[in-house]
Structures are given as structure tokens and as C-alpha cells.
Image (cartoon, grey):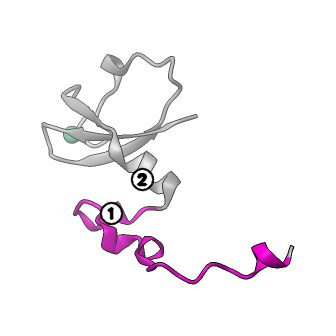
């Protein structure tokens, strides 16, 4: 069941809900003030799943992936030894 993150426009509270994809989103209410004036956020769940450092509030850059900065290493000898 997906975890959805909502933002309440009435009280500015962020909250998360476990919801079936079948749920009518217009029925969702703020758990804090009961307002229906909530908006669903999309990013957090995927970010957590992938374990990427997007929680720091800036877009991921190449610096977040040091593994991709590896310069051209010598070709492993394994290939010729096989
Ligand atoms: Zn609210």
C-alpha cells in the first residue's frame, strides 16, 4: 500500500497517510484540522525507496554519487586471465 504525503493548506501541516490506490483522494482530510483543503505530495516516497539524498532539500548532483566520478581505471586483468 503506498504511503502518500499531504500538505494541508489550511494549517500548513504536512502529514503522511497509508492509502490504497482505490481511495478517492478528494475525500482525504487533514488529520490535524480536518480540512479538506489538502494537497498530495509526490516526491518523498520515491526518494525514500531509492535511498537518494534528496531529503537535504537540494537536487541531487554528481557530487552525491561519488561512484560515478571514478576516473578511467586500468582495465582489470581478470579479462585477459580468463
Ligand atoms: Zn490542516
Q: Tell me which corner region of the image, top left, top right, bottom left or bottom right, holds residue 9.
A: top left
Q: Within 8 Å of ligand 1, the CB of disc 2?
A: no
Q: Count neighbours of disc 1 (C-alpha within 10 A) and say few if under 14, some if 14 to 19, many if 20 or more.
A: few
Q: Within 8 Å of ligand 1, the CB of disc 1?
A: no
Residue position for label 2: 47
Q: Quadrant of the C terminus?
A: bottom right
Which mark, residue 32? none
Marks 2 and 1: CB-CB under 8 Å? Answer: yes
Question: Range of the magenta residues?
Answer: 52-81
Q: Which residue is drawn at 73% across and 82% down?
A: 77
Which mark, residue 55? 1
| 35 is within the stretch colored magenta | no
Q: Residue at x 18, y 28 (%)?
A: 37
Q: Count neighbours of disc 2 (C-alpha within 10 A) and say few if under 14, some if 14 to 19, many if 20 or more.
A: few
| 69 is within the stretch colored magenta | yes
In this rendering, is residue 14 above or below 33? below
Dot placed on the residue nearer the N-terminal end, 2 or 1: 2
Quadrant containing ligand 1: top left
Q: Where is residue 50 in the image (x, y as percent from the top left)?
A: 50, 55
Amino acid at each position: 500500500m503506498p504511503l502518500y504525503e499531504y500538505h494541508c493548506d489550511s494549517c500548513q501541516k504536512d502529514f503522511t497517510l497509508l492509502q490504497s490506490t482505490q481511495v478517492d483522494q478528494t475525500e482525504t482530510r487533514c488529520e490535524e484540522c480536518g480540512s479538506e483543503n489538502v494537497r498530495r505530495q509526490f516526491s518523498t516516497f520515491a526518494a525514500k525507496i531509492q535511498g537518494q539524498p534528496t531529503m537535504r532539500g537540494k537536487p541531487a548532483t554528481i557530487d552525491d554519487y561519488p561512484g560515478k566520478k571514478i576516473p578511467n581505471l586500468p582495465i582489470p586483468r581478470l579479462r585477459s586471465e580468463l
